[in-house]
Image (cartoon, helix red, strand yellow):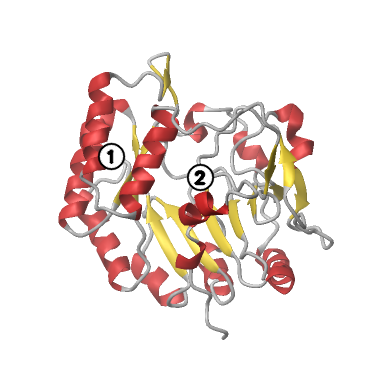
């Protein structure tokens, strides 16, 4: 039986926030030129075709802010009839409308909390609690950006008091002309480790620890000289804002883009790879690569079995 597909869709590079640690704010000024808006009908047709080829998929929406995409609620209500939807979002939108329009059991929200941008922490948490009560809630994600690290940890403690899980994402970028996460101070690392240790035992603590170990402590790095057989492109793929489909979950050097290109979501002949293919990208920045023969390592991290298959409608 073929492994269920996991597809990340960076739906567009556009956001209603301007967080100082986000590539949309700090990166290339023309990043929005990659965005394509082919219309709801063409997108639904493409996803119907994916369903006919591969069955129900797991679609992980990222951005930018996905909910600023045109007709996004309608897109979710339609896709949720066949695929499971996992969404990262800053939660500026109406949670009650989402609950009304998205089929029960067809979606999970991974809210991203940004201190200084969402004006009311309690209101944000109330939305999360509402989603949790209806079965749509995942875990709150926060970037451990040094200037707001204390606010992030305080928010984590507040969410925990309400029974809401949190994941702390190491900041990756430049701050005060220093590269991160390499430039975290010993005290900042200690604060992160204390926060991780306080997370509920099980998957949430493991995910927090994996992020820290991989990005901050640089542990568990694979042998970069070894040419690896990776199932990215066959079991996993990443859809870009221009609807091109890349095999890798992380950015690849521009000069090697064609090597990692699988095709276009809108191409009527689009197919994923039939099997694992070699990859020699170095360094590999994916903390859970799908290396052939190491399924016992990466399958527990991807947790395919936790994503329900929507009931036929």
Quadrant of res 74: bottom right
Q: Which is nearer the N-term, disc 2 or disc 1?
A: 2
The tag on residue 128 is none
Q: Is residue 290 above or below residue 271?
A: above
Q: Is residue 21 visible?
A: no
Percent position of residue 281, x then y = 67, 31
Secondary structure beneath label 1: loop
Secondary structure beneath label 2: loop
Q: Residue at x 35, y 71 (%)?
A: 135
Screen quadrant of the N terminus: bottom right
Q: Residues within 10 Å of mark 2 (few under 14, many from 20)?
A: many
Q: Residue furthest bottom?
A: 313
Percent position of residue 226, x then y = 67, 31
Percent position of residue 224, x then y = 62, 28
Q: Which one is in front, 172 or 212?
A: 212
Residue pointed to by mark 2:
64
Q: Residue at x 65, y 46 (%)?
A: 240
Q: Is residue 77 visible?
A: yes
Q: Residues within 10 Å of mark 1 (few under 14, many from 20)?
A: some
Quadrant of res 186: top left
Q: Residue at x 18, y 46 (%)?
A: 157
Percent position of residue 117, x then y = 31, 41
Q: Which one is in front, 116 or 8?
A: 8
Residue pointed to by mark 1:
115
Quadrant of res 223: top right
């Amino acid at each position: 039986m073929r492994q269920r597909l996991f597809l990340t869709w960076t739906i567009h590079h556009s956001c209603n926030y301007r967080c100082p640690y986000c590539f949309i704010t700090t990166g290339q000024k023309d990043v929005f030129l990659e965005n394509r808006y082919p219309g709801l009908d063409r997108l639904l047709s493409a996803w119907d075709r994916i369903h006919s080829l591969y069955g129900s998929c797991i679609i992980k929406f990222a951005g930018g802010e996905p909910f600023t995409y045109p007709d996004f609620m309608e897109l979710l209500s339609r896709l949720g009839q066949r695929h499971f939807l996992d969404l990262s979002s800053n939660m500026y939108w109406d949670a009650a409308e989402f609950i009304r329009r998205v089929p029960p059991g067809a979606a999970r929200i991974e809210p991203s909390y940004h201190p200084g941008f969402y004006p009311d922490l309690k209101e944000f948490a109330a939305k999360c609690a509402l989603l949790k009560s209806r079965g749509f809630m995942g875990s709150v994600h926060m970037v451990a950006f040094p200037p707001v690290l204390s606010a992030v940890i305080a928010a984590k403690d507040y969410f925990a008091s309400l029974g809401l899980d949190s994941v702390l994402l190491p900041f990756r970028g430049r701050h005060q002309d220093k590269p991160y996460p390499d430039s975290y101070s010993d005290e900042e690392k200690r604060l992160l480790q204390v926060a991780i240790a306080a997370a509920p035992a099980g998957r949430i603590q493991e995910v927090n620890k994996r992020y820290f170990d991989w990005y901050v402590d640089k542990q568990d790095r694979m042998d970069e000289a070894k040419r690896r057989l990776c199932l990215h492109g066959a079991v996993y793929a990443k859809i870009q804002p221009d609807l091109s489909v890349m095999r890798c979950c992380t950015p690849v050097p521009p000069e090697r883009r064609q090597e990692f290109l699988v095709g276009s979501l809108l191409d009527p002949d689009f197919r994923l790879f039939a099997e694992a293919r070699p990859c020699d990208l170095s360094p590999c920045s994916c903390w859970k690569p799908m290396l052939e023969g190491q399924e016992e390592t990466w399958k527990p991290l991807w947790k395919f079995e936790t994503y329900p298959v929507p009931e036929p409608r």
